[in-house]
Image (cartoon, rainbow, N blue to C red):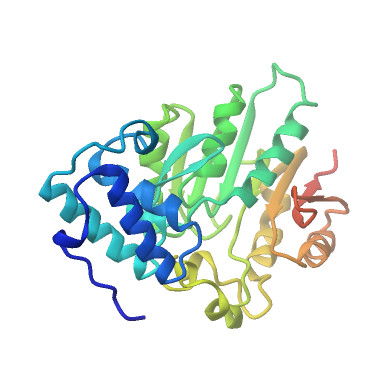
Amino acid sequence: MSKIEFSLDSLPDTLGMAVDAVAKKFKQVGIDGARLDARLIVTHGLGVEPQKVLTHPELSIAPEDCQKIIEMAHRRIQREPMSHILGEREFWSMDFKVTADTLTPRPDTETLVDVVLSKVAKLPTDSKLGILDLGTGTGCILLTLLSEIPNANGIGVDISEAALSVAHANASSLGLLGRAAFSQGHWGDGLEACFDIVVSNPPYIPAQDIHTLSAEVSKYEPRSALDGGEDGLDAYCDIAADLKRLLKPGGFACFEVGIGQAEDVSKILSDSGFTKNEIHSDLSGIERVVLVNATI
């Protein structure tokens, strides 16, 4: 993709007009949500709240801030994700640090959180719960659950040391370091503890399909967080092999799955001895989560 050139002269020096100019450029290259992205980039570059565009469009922009905005706009034109440009993404109404080493938290994953919380609501409130998050990435699943379940502690596991650093930073910024720990490893390998709840949003894109994804994903998200092998199911097979060892009797596990994968993942888990399975759909009616119950 050719790079559309900005210049300081072409970027107006007031907030509202700058947003208009950047949004126009984004629309020219086919960026969805062009105006929203422009508003976020301009206000982030200025260090002001996004609503300032409506309340103070006349706010002046210093030349050095213009340059900062132009540089961020160039990155977006090259389809770098907004989460990387801004360095964060909202999930469950909380802000999570995001880098090129982590998968960007997505609304789809909130369905998994919903399912877990619905299940936890039926448990005794005085019981202490242990949560294991396999492939934790930013830590968004584990940390969101800990924020909603005060009687829980958890461990996030990831093979990427860089991702674990991001998750640790998110736990610190959210005030959850006292109840969250992080460990480098490959799924459940080497873990000896048993947990009440196991959660995972593993890579589930078939390897040959990754190039068909949007440039924001295929070019910029870590391949290790996307590539699920030939059929997209490799990670579920690996996790299922360890799940009986990791899950306490009476506990449960929740997995996010790709479109059309729910039945296959349920079968993988059934073949590993977990026959009390449930499939839950997201708000669009897409089967998004597989829940398995351990026998007592």
Residue 281 drawn at (x, y percent) = 79, 51
Residue in view at x 55 percent, y 77 percent: 210
Which is more toward the observer, 242 or 199?
199
Dividing the image into 4 quarters, which one contains the N terminus?
A: bottom left
Is 124 situated left or right of 70 in this image?
right
Point out the residue furthest to the right here: 275
Residue 221 drawn at (x, y percent) = 44, 65
Say if 257 sits above or below 278 in the image: below
Which is more toward the observer, 132 or 248?
132
Is 285 situated left or right of 128 in this image?
right
Which is more toward the observer, 187 or 53?
53
Residue in view at x 56 percent, y 37 percent: 92
Say if 260 sits above or below 23 in the image: below
Quadrant in the rendering for residue 126: top right
- Residue 237 in sight in this render: yes
Residue 172 drawn at (x, y percent) = 37, 33
Residue in view at x 21 percent, y 52 percent: 12
Dividing the image into 4 quarters, which one contains the C terminus?
A: top right
Point out the residue furthest to the top here: 126
Point out the residue furthest to the bottom here: 208
Point out the residue furthest to the left here: 63
Is 294 situated left or right of 134 in this image?
right
- Residue 192 in sight in this render: no
Quadrant in the rendering for residue 229: bottom right
Quadrant in the rendering for residue 232: bottom right
Count of residue discs: 0
Residue in view at x 31 percent, y 57 percent: 21
Residue 183 drawn at (x, y percent) = 45, 48
